[in-house]
Amino acid sequence: MKKLLLSLVAALMILSGCNKAKQFKVTVNLENSDGQTAYLIKSLDGKKPIPVDTAEFVGNKAVLTADIDNPQALYILKVKGARFPYMLFPENQDVTVTGDFNDFVHVEATGGDTQNAFNEYQKAIVKINEPGYAIEKEINEAFEANDSLKYEELNAQFLVIWHENFDFKKDYVRNHADNYVGHYVLDDMKYDIEFDEVKELAELLTNESAYRDNVVKYIENTERVEIGAQFIDFTLKTADGKDVNLAEVIKNNKVTLVDFWASWCGPCRNENPFVKEAYEKYHAMGLEIVGISVDRNEAAWLQAVEEDALPYIQVRDAEGVAGDDYAVVYIPSNFLYDQNGVMIAKGLRGEELEAKLAEVLN
């Protein structure tokens, strides 16, 4: 019996050891960081960052740990009080971050091959962008001083750096299309460059990666919301819990405007009066509007609907499912469909919306 008990204890210890997750460490050595807090956040799809660990700096040092799971995961290191976060690509290997809390832009990381490659990429980006940091400060000062001439002059200088930044990134993808750092770079900038450029660069990507998958999905979704494409159906709920099915709305109206917005979006709120005016003028002639709020806060959404006195259909896409299907990156965004469900226009703002509706309904 004693031998049996010992065997059971040994077996349990082995199982316990097998079930313990392996981890890697991120050791952060920053001068002038005592008393600050470091946060480690994991991000793979670029949308839902996951908090991983928190550590206080003692003797200018903090150590964070993360369970080993997906080697492609990007990690974000944030230090309370620092202006910028720092991106890490540890690939499940220990990483050491060194630098000065007061000069976070020039922090450096060393680790495995992928991290070291990613670190070189980041250093190159910092070198390109560094002149822009001072210009950005001057731009804000010129704006506050209402100095439009100075503002335009500085903004032109800033745009030169902006273009240099993206030219470098595009070249980086072309030269590193066979690894997921290059894939990540394209995924990260896909909303900021021309769609045709995204497609061209995506064709170069070899190997599989989560970031390549993100780019492919973005391309597929964007092509589905081009003028001439068929609508993408969805069913969302109104504030009182009623289902609104887009296919039914389109079938029962001459034209349907699908309008993405949010209570916290200033340009959206500024646009709402134009959308409301168009509805009131053309609803009797066959126009229906489905306003889709991307608000996570239901109360804020309902308050905005009431404040703006929006008379047309209002639903909420809190989880961003319809927004993803429609490749919505910026709001306000809208899509106009005819009764056959074919897109006839998109991105209509202000008087453009009125003109298009007059064209198709008068």
Image: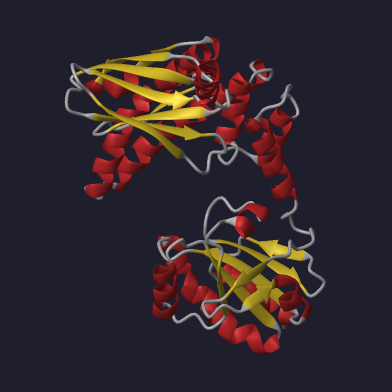
Quadrant for the N terminus, please.
top right
In this rendering, the count of numbered labels is: 0
In the rendered image, residue 356, in percent from the top left (x then y), is placed at 67, 71
Residue at figure coordinates x 62%, y 22% from the top left: 180
In the rendered image, residue 285, in percent from the top left (x then y), is placed at 69, 87
Q: Please give left or right for residue 75 compared with residue 175 in the image.
A: left
Q: Which sits in the foreground, 221 or 95?
A: 95
Protein image colouring: secondary structure
Q: Residue furthest front?
A: 1
Quarter of the rendering containing residue 38: top left
Q: Which sits in the foreground, 220 or 361?
A: 220
As drawn, 237 above or below 165: below
Residue at figure coordinates x 27%, y 35% from the top left: 137
Q: Which sits in the foreground, 292 or 239?
A: 239
Quadrant for the C terminus, please.
bottom right
Q: Please give left or right for residue 31 compared with residue 27 in the image.
A: left
Quarter of the rendering containing residue 236: bottom right
In the rendered image, residue 224, in percent from the top left (x then y), is placed at 75, 53
Residue at figure coordinates x 64%, y 85% from the top left: 283
As drawn, 91 above or below 198: above
Q: Residue furthest right?
A: 340
Q: Which sits in the foreground, 234 or 2?
A: 2
Q: Residue furthest bottom?
A: 284
